[in-house]
Amino acid sequence: MSHIFPRHAKSAPPVATGGAGCYLHDAAGKAYLDASGGAAVSCLGHGDRTVIDAVKAQLDSLAFAHTGFFTSEPAERLADLLIAHAPGDLDRVYLVSGGSEATEAAIKLARQYFVETGQPQRGRLVARRQSYHGNTIGALSAGGNAWRRQQFGPLLLDVRHIDPCYEYRLRAEGESVEDYALRAADALEAELERLGPETVMAFMAEPVVGATAGAVPAVPGYFRRIREICDRHGILMILDEVMCGMGRTGSLFACEQDGVAPDILCIAKGLGAGYQPIGAMLCTGRIYDAIAEGSGFFQHGHTYVGHPTAAAAGHAVVSAILERGLVARSAAQGAALREALDAVFGQHPHVGDIRGRGLFLGLELVADRATKAPFDPARRLAARIKAAAFEAGLICYPMSGTIDGRLGDHVLLAPPFIISDDQIGELTDKLGRAIDTALAA
Ligand code: PMP
């Protein structure tokens, strides 16, 4: 019996014992092609010697020093490296232990910024109905996934959710992409008018939606309009790149491709690549200075903020991504994977949409391609695909639910940037068989 909490499955999962490159192994010696990087975590693959050695060296010199007393060399080096490559005016870094801590910190920083700058009436957050920002109470409140939120309603903050930018389902028949971009973004303007823009502190969104819909990028022009609206009303734009950042979409930060820079940016997952738990919140000098010159400190914190060993891992990972040309590789292998998916699933009667950017790609499954009708949730198609793929030695990330709970089944693919052409063939082959097995069940 396993004493690990929680255990959903009736039978215990296999025990993972090792990993090398794009594969994980279990105690029985079975190999699994890791086509989701866990959940878009393992961007470098498993067993990366450089990162392992950097972590070991850090442990030998300094494992931990509390930031109430010290800064540390790896934390400073990582912050410098992130700022050297960060978009726009992002100028300060707050190092945390994961994605939810980053988004939670972003929400509190936005609020404190307005308190310090004499606008205490600004306390509202607007986010999107198709989004995941984490599982702590603030982050869960920001997220729009009805299934994850449903039990916790009385505990959640009053966050208003607008429709996402979701071309496959929400662009109207005959509407141009340009018009749709503006219409989708103008939902923010309308919501601000309803709420009174002077009561709103920030808008939060994922540039490419991950865990609720399998890699949905915004259409070109959407985020530029969002940026304009935020600026016009003096509200902060918070971008959550916890999943889609760090080269995953073919640029170091996903928002670079949207031609915008946020006021606050959250990253995690690919930042530590699984070698250490780490996330970060980046903010502009304007926000930082307002607090530094006001009360003097961000009223927030966790014991492991700026953890030296985690920071050493993060620095080694970001260095590896930059020095090995892995951003370009993510773009190139992403294009190759996209081509392979188009070849295998382009005519599939139950694959309605293939989408994404770089090595962050998704499939949306439908009962009927013409009407885009989703499958009956009772079929549990996503769960069946996950099980059939796992059985065949493929780790992918199927999920159900888009807007307002369960609408559709999706498969998210986010393999390591080092994936080879042969492994792309293995991925699409195994995924095709897993989808057909699940559909036949
Ligand atoms: N934001 C996004 C966009 C995510 O995808 C996730 C994790 N799936 C989180 C936040 C939360 O990160 P964590 O699980 O590390 O707390």
Image (cartoon, rainbow, N blue to C red):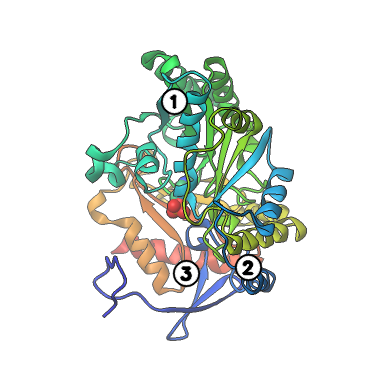
Q: Nearer the viewer, residue 58 or 386?
A: 58
Q: Tell me if residue 72 comes above or below residue 236 in the rendering.
A: below
Picture quarter containing residue 86?
top right
| Residue 62 circle label | 2
Q: Earlier along the polypeptide chain: callout 3 or callout 1?
A: 1
Instruction: Answer yes or no: is residue 94 visible.
Output: yes
- On screen, residue 239 versus residue 134, left or right, reads right
Q: Which part of the image, by quadrant, shows the C terminus?
A: bottom left
| Residue 394 circle label | 3
**Label 3 neighbour load within 10 Å: few <14, some 14-19, many 20+:** many
In the rendered image, residue 230, in percent from the top left (x then y), is placed at 54, 22
**Label 2 neighbour load within 10 Å: few <14, some 14-19, many 20+:** some
Q: Earlier along the polypeptide chain: callout 2 or callout 3?
A: 2
Q: Tell me if residue 429 comes above or below residue 221 in the rendering.
A: below
Query: What type is the residue that disc 1 sits on?
Result: Ala
Q: Secondary structure at mark 3?
A: strand
Q: Which of label 3 and label 1 is nearer to you?
A: 3
| Residue 172 circle label | 1
